[in-house]
């Protein structure tokens, strides 16, 4: 399975891709997602897609959206790791978190 990944708008697209095609994407690394789905698709729930979600404390809207998606996944009992860092909406933090995300997503469960 593939990992869908993205930052900012790309994070929303990565989440949406895995929701629409859980047969293709087995995991998601989404950083500072601006827009997230309102609900988890039945197919994605059945596939138990793993999510690594992260956002900075200095990007309020993105932080809130990312946290909301993490909470939805956690309530559904799906594998999810949610991280926050002191920082804003920029490449420095995303680049630092990307290897961590891949390590968690690709580790044997």
Image (spheres, rainbow, N blue to C red):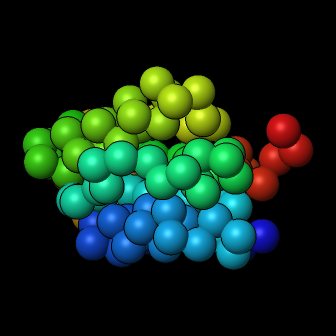
Q: Which residue is drawn at 38% across and 73% down?
A: 13
In this view, 68 is above or below 37: above
Residue 96 rendering spot, x and y as whole percentages: 49, 56
Residue 15 rendering spot, x and y as whole percentages: 44, 62
Residue 6 rendering spot, x and y as whole percentages: 43, 70
Please indicate, yes or no, whether residue 22 appears anywhere in the rendered image.
yes
Instruction: Out of 83 and 9, give the one closest to the viewer.
Output: 9
In this view, 23 is above or below 77: below
Q: Which residue is drawn at 39% across and 57% down?
A: 31
Instruction: Out of 95 and 54, give the one closest to the viewer.
Output: 54
In this view, 45 is above or below 19: above
Q: Which residue is drawn at 70% across and 61% down?
A: 26
Q: Quadrant of the C terminus?
A: top right
Residue 57 rendering spot, x and y as whole percentages: 21, 37
Q: Quadrant of the N terminus?
A: bottom right
Q: Which residue is drawn at 48% across and 36% down?
A: 73
């Amino acid at each position: 399975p593939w990992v869908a990944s993205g930052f900012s708008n790309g994070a929303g697209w990565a989440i949406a891709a895995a929701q629409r095609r859980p047969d293709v994407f087995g995991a998601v690394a989404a950083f500072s997602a601006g827009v997230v789905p309102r609900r988890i698709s039945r197919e994605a729930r059945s596939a138990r897609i793993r999510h690594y979600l992260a956002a900075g404390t200095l990007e309020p809207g993105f932080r809130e959206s990312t946290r909301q998606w993490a909470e939805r996944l956690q309530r559904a009992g799906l594998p999810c790791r949610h991280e926050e860092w002191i920082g804003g909406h920029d490449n420095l933090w995303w680049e630092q978190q990307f290897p961590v995300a891949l390590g968690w997503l690709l580790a044997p469960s």
